[in-house]
Every structure is written in C-alpha cells, then in structure tokens.
Amino acid sequence: MRRILLSRREENVIMFFIVAKKQSLPVWKGLFIGLLIFLAVSAGLLLQIIRQLPDVETINSYLPSETTLIFSADGKVLARLHQEENRQVVPLSKIFPFMQNAVVATEDPRFYYHHGLDFGGIFRATIKNLIYGRVVEGGSTLTQQLAKNLFLNRRKTVLRKLAEAILAMQIEKRYTKEEILELYLNQVYFGHNAYGIESAANIYFGKSAAELNLAEAAMLAGIIRGPELYSPYHNFNGAKSRQIYVINKMLEFGLVNERDAKLAAIQNLDFSPKNLRRYGEIAPYFISYILQQLINQYGEEMVYHGGLRVYTTLDTRLQSSAENIITRFVSQEGQRYNFTQAALVSIDPRTGNIKVMVGGADFFQSKFNHAVQAKRQPGSAFKPFVYTAAMEQGISPGTILMDTPTTFHVYPNLWNPDGTWQPKNFDRRFNGPVTLRTALERSLNIPAIKLMERVGIPAAIDVAKRLGITSHLEPGLALTLGVSEVSLLELTSAYTAFANSGIRVEPAAVLKIDNRDGVTIFKQTIEEKHVLDPNIAAVMVDLLKGVIARGTGAHANIGRPAAAKTGTTENFHDAWFIGFVPQLVTGVWVGNDDNRSMKGVAEVAVCPRIWKEYNLIALAEKPALDFSKPEGLVNVKICVASGKLAGPNCPEKLRQWAAFWSKDAPTKTCDIHKSASDESQDKEENNETIPPEGY
C-alpha cells in the first residue's frame, strides 16, 4: 500500500473534522443558542431604536429655521436676516426642473423606484469602497439624507445608520416622492451658511431657484457632496469638476440631451460674491435701524428664524444716489473742510415714509448710525421753532429786532459763572436793526435770542415737542442757538410739519410685515397730527424760502420752490442743512466722530451742496410744486431804522420789504429821514411797487 504523506496543516484540518464529528451535538447546540441570543439582542436593540425614533408625522408641523427677508419699496431684497441657517422655503413648483433632476441624478438615481432604501446602491457603494480602501461613494438615498437632516445627529455610527434606514422607510410610506424631494431641497446644506436651494441660488448666483439655468443647477447639485470643499469661491476647479460630473450623470440617465449638456459644460458662470455679506451693498445703516425695531417688536428668535417678509419704505434708486454723494463729498472735500463723517435722511412729509437713510461714510468701517444714534447740537437749525412760537403769538415777520452787542442775564454755569452772557454772530459782526425775516435768513444769533426772550422759553420748547423733538431740551436762552442735542432723523422729521401744512406724521420705515405663511401681521397706518395752524406753517415756509433765496442756504437753489435752514455749532463741531419741497424733506449733517472742529464754512459750503445734488436727482421726475401761500399778511416797504413806511429820503440800504399781520402793518412814514416830502405820495409809491418773491 502506498503511503499518503500529509502536510502538518492538512493533518490539523482532518483532526478538526474528526473532533467536530464526535462533538457535533454540543457544538451545533451552542451555535443555535448563540444565534438565538444574537437575534434576541438585535430585536431588543431594534425595538429600543424604534421606540426612541421621532414620529415622522411631525414633518407636517415641522417649521425649519427660515431667513427673514427685508424688501425695499421698489421690491428689491435689501437683506436676509439669519443666524445659524440662512434658509428660504419654496415649493417644488418654484424650483427649476433641471435642478430637481440634477440632484436626483447625482445623489439618488433610483429615487423614484425605491421605498426609502436602495439595496443595489448600498451593495455597489460597499464594493467600490472596499476596492479603494476608503469611502468614495455613499449608499444613502435622498430620503435617508432627509431623515438624517431632520431628525438625527451627524455622527457616523451603526445605530444612527440603522435609525436612518427605519425613518427613511417610514417617511416613504407617509409622503409622496414630490413632497420628499421638496423637503430635501429646502433642507440640504450648500455651504456659506446657505440652507436650501433658494438661499443657495441667491448666495452663489444672485437669483431665485426658479431662475437657475442648467449650468448653475449642475454646479449647485455638485456642491452638495462637499459644500465647503467644492465651493466655487474657495475651490473653483473642484466645483467645476463636480459640475461636469453632474452633467454627465444627467446625460447618462437621459435627463438632458447631449447638445444642452455640452453648452452647459462650457458656459461662463456669473457668481455673486457680494451676497456673502450679511448686509447688502445698499442701505446697511437703514437695515440696522430696521433690525433693531424688529427685534424689539418680535424678538430675536422670530426675526432670525421665523421667515418674516418685511416690506420697507426705502427707495433703492435714491438710496444708492445718496450713498454715492455722501461718500464722494467725504472723500473729496472732507480734508479741505476737516470732516470725516456725513449723514443724510430723506422723508416724505405726507406719509412719514423714510425714503433714504445714510448713516455714515462707510458702514463696513463704522457701523455707528449718525442719522439715528448720534445726538449732536443742531445749532441754528433749531431757530425755526423759536420763530414759529413768535408767529403763533402774532409777532409779524416784519418786526424789527436789534442786532447789537447785548449782555443777557442767565443762571450762573460753567461757561457763564457770573450769570452774564454776551453771545456773538457767526461772522462776529453786528447789523443793527433787522427784520425778523432777515434775522432768520442770515441766521443772526442776537436777534434770535432776543426773540426767545420775547416769546418765552416754554413756548419755544412746546413748539419743538409738538413738531416731534423727543430729546431733552435744556430750558435757557441758549436753546435758540441749538445747544441741546438731537438726532438727524428727529430734526428732519420735525421739519415735515412745515412742509405738510402743519400736519405731522411719525417717521416710518416699514410698510407691511408678513409671516412665513403669507399672513400680514403688521400694516402701516398713517396717523396725522395737526401740530400747527396751516397758515402759521405757510408763514414759516415763506420765511424759510428766503434762506435759499437770499440767505445762508444760497448754494442749495434747485430752481423750484424750496425752503431750508442751515445750522452750525459753536467752534464748528457740527454742520446741518434741513431743506424741503412739498414732496420731500431732507436733512444733511457733517462732522467728526471725535468732535474735532471743522473749518467754519461747512454749514454753507458743504451741506447745502450735498442737499442740492441729492434733490436734483430725487426730484428729477417729480412736478415742481409750490407751498400754500400765507394769508393775513400785508407787504410794505419800510425803513428798518424806524420800522415805519420808508420815505423817499431813507437810505437805500435801510429800505426793505417786510410782511406784517394786517393789525400790525405800519401806517406812518419814517420820520427819522423825513424832509419836505408828501406823505400821501410816499404811501402811493409803496402801494404800487410789487415785493420780490418770498416776501
């Protein structure tokens, strides 16, 4: 017999089967018991997972964090407010069909055929990952990804994957494929804090999901696999490679024809990196102003996650023009006149709507809003409130005030420890007798202080408060020179009562707010307050017209009826110009954050020109309207030296037209410069001459 030689390894295998045969019953019994234990543990674990899973029915009531949108009055998106998640939820019907197909082809080609799990896809992904020795392909369906995004954490564990699979099958049983795809496209992350396809379309291409083309849709679909890795802003080559991959996938599954695929692959894409900023390029100061109001009213949770739609009063065309003008003046003339900041506010006096708000030269350098947050001394821009009090007390515009060196007695303070005050005019000169109108047009200080003494400090404060000044006004004669601080928005709003025939409307920035369901939760109501007699307002407008026609605001002449007041503070810390036409009231301020003094002519050389340049644009397509004419005034030519009718011997420089309430109109001729003239003839001369416009 031939001897069979066996290797050591073969002998061990034979011995294993001999032993196993002898002990077959105990071994198989052990294996069976082990299998039962394994099944019991698995069943218990599965039951525990199922019990802890959320109810997929909650998707019906699920409210994802959604971005709040702020719109301008002309329908443009000014800002998207969000924190962790920038998301806008849109229905599937408003998502470009190629976008839907691109995502399905790339992420889950069998989406419309499986019931939550794609076993073929799982098997293929497993084999491919084993071949490469690393994870190169995932087997998760869109439904599994949705389940993970909605209900689970992102840790890659066996238990999470099992829970994901169970939830995916439950979701498929309760919702249609269209509902699942809509949820997925509104939930998935695209990088740069953009959640959902609508936000992604805006962040990358500055458009809505419905406006995407094939090339853009393929680019976005490719980003999903690695949002930060494949961002075209950070890795364009990688993003382009993914785009081509998506186009080929769509071509492979017959979701696009070859011609369109080739055109999409070579199309140049227009990205919008500016949309990566939290605030848009237009009106950042206005947005910050709106944001604070919204948070105060609705709270941060609603504002940043509630998907509000906020419709504002802002006009983007005018806003862009104003921002450019402010930036240019600060850049080109700031050094010449020694100022580094400027602000502008423009309001429709009939509605209170804020049309423009520029809070500074550059929001991204300084977010401090000089139009709202800054409280500065208005200087002579406060004087119209004092003059209004005088008109209400029946004092005539033609009243003579003495512009001469005067000592006023005040309460002792840091600046006037002995209780005396000797103010001066802007030019350090005195003009002798002047009419009230002239004093306002030329912004003379001494006559204004004397007028404050005459009308009383409480009366002037009352007018200012009625017209909308809410800041504290320190009672004192110096108040007429604007020593109490106010904001530009506050002061500009107060002037709207002059432009609107004595009717004040609170400044408004929001027209309407809708919640995420489209239900209006706020709507603007215009509440008119009659704060001035219409004729008093008309008289004040008539006086303020002279500021542009003959006074300190001459650089603001825009060739149509307009009224205004300049203002500057002692030591030239601030310069103001508040001007208006019947349709628009606009305030301008220039100065420095550190309160450094400017060169003293900024009040008349810079602010009026900013105002003029802006208004020439703002009013270009609006009719030239005039204000109501004042009633009850008569115009006569007087000699300012006597306050009486001018005679033929009165020096020309003393002869002026003046307006008086009928009861106060002078009837006697000047007797200071009188000679042998015929008084009646002199009266006839005055009656035949027509006063210039504005008197």
Image (tube, helix red, strand yellow):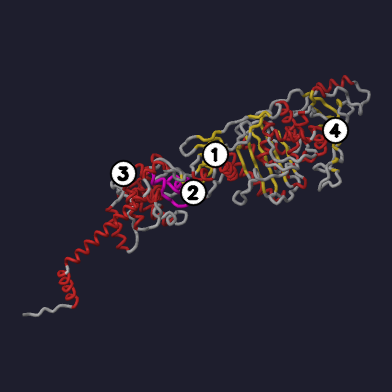
Q: Could you say which quadrant of the image residue 420 lies in? A: top right
Mark earlier in primary sequence (4, 3): 3
Q: Is residue 452 left or right of residue 270?
A: right
SS at mark 3 in the image: helix
Q: Amino acid at mark 2?
A: Ser
Determine crowd level at label 2: few under 14, some 14-19, many 20+ residues with C-alpha closer than 10 A: some
From the top left corner, tell me how far across and down residue 426 is, in percent.
80, 42
Residue stretch in magenta = 182-206
Q: Residue 89 versus residue 275: which sits nearer the camera?
A: 89
User: Where is the N terminus found, in terms of image quarters?
Assistant: bottom left
Q: Secondary structure at mark 4?
A: helix
Please, what is the dominant secondary structure of the magenta stretch? helix
Mark 3, residues whose alpha carbon is within 10 Å: few (<14), some, or many (≥20)? few
Residue holding disc 3: 173
Question: Closer to the observer: label 4 or label 3?
Answer: 3
Q: Amino acid at mark 3?
A: Lys
Residue found 67% across the figure and 39% down from its top:
490
Q: Is label 4 or label 1 in front?
A: 1
